[in-house]
Image: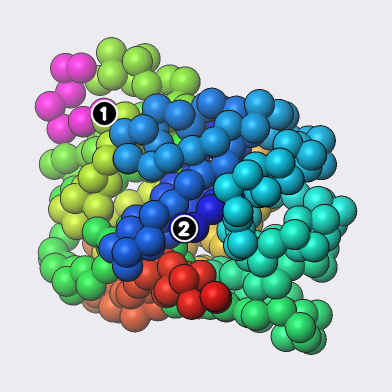
Amino acid sequence: MLYIRTDMNDVIATGHMMRCLAIADAAKEQGEETVFLLADDAARTLLAQRGYAYRILYTKWNAMEQELSRLEEIIQELGIARLLIDSYQVTEAYLRRLSALVETYYIDDRNAFVYPVNGLICYAGYYAKFDYPARYPDARLYLGTAYAPLRRAFCGCPAKAISERAKRLLLLSGGSDPHDMLAGLLFRLKDEGFCRIDVICGMYHGGYAQLKETYRTEEAVHIHRAVSDIEQYMRQTDLAVSAGGMTLYELCACGVPSVSFTFADNQLDNARQMEADGLMDYAGDARRDDVISNAVRLIRRLRDDAALREERSQRMQKLVDGKGAERIAAVLSAVF
């Protein structure tokens, strides 16, 4: 049995939960069931829909040390021997106490401090900057984009068919959109000659209804919310504009020439590294840059340059093969 401690809500959105669900799905295919341990019931409906068991701690998601006594009771009750943890709210004291009880594995992409765990997973392309081997001489390390935990739908994607001129556009912001970037991007890009624009609003997007109403008569514009088959939209589109995060790895797996933007600190390294590696352009940080104008300029360039899109697409798919969740699940099942 695999146990995962993670959360989702309207503040942190769905990124942590979705990558953990990808790992749980892969573990199930390998014959192992998963139980999720949650601070509250925000993920109850999603987990029920996906068929996963869960235990609610009834604690504060952003005060994890306060849950330790309750979590220790559950560890003893369920006989938990290993625990995968995915939360930015962990502290050194929290992890140290858990590591004295169970085999701990932590998903990291920030290098906030030296995590006292038995195993560390960092799928980010910028992992080398953290010098993990020198800082974790006694931990098991699983590093690089080979461990990007994507759903099975992103495994073995066919090579992207590149049109001479891009005609379809996909706009994404992840689970939330605190700076209302989708509305701004759509307003500027709807007149750029695309025959179809798909806009994917996340579960915690507050402006979905307004967007739907605003563009209800625009035949080329299609507004969606929290779709379960986002890979289909990625495979069908020619170009994408997306917030940083796991979505960028999904776009890589599908080979979609893309422009990224950020609105949170934990997205910065990811977007900047992909730009430095020549994988996708970065339009800036929504908190301080004119992301929309930058994105329009960069999309125009990609739209009109099929050779550039072809080159980018091939490099993206070479970086991410979509098997990261399978590899992590295999690692966790082989621990004991």
Residue 283 place in picture, x, y as percent: 51, 53
Q: Around disc 1, counting alpha carbons within 10 Å, would you say few (fewer than 14), some (14 to 19), or many (20 or more)?
A: some
Residue at 42%, 59% (x, y): give it.
23
Q: What residue type is disc 2 on?
A: Met
**Residue 29 in view in this figure:** yes
The residue pinned by badge 1 equals 223
Start-end of magenta stretch: 216-223
> Which element carries disc 1, helix, strand or loop?
strand
Q: Around disc 2, counting alpha carbons within 10 Å, would you say few (fewer than 14), some (14 to 19), or many (20 or more)?
A: some
To which quarter of the image does residue 104 belong? bottom right
65 in relation to 222, above or below: below
Q: Does the stretch in magenta take in 218?
A: yes
Residue 276 place in picture, x, y as percent: 55, 74
In front of the other: 325 or 70: 70
* Tag shown at residue 1: 2
Q: Does the stretch in magenta take in 310?
A: no
Judge depth for marks 1 and 2 and give the one in front.
2
**Residue 294 in view in this figure:** no
326 in relation to 72, above or below: below
Relative side of 222 to 312, left or right: left
Residue at 72%, 29% (x, y): give it.
60
Residue 25 place in picture, x, y as percent: 34, 56
Residue at 58%, 37% (x, y): give it.
38
In front of the other: 5 or 206: 5
16 in relation to 216, above or below: below
162 in relation to 66, above or below: below
In front of the other: 82 or 315: 82
| Residue at mark 1 to residue at mark 2: CA–CA distance | 39 Å
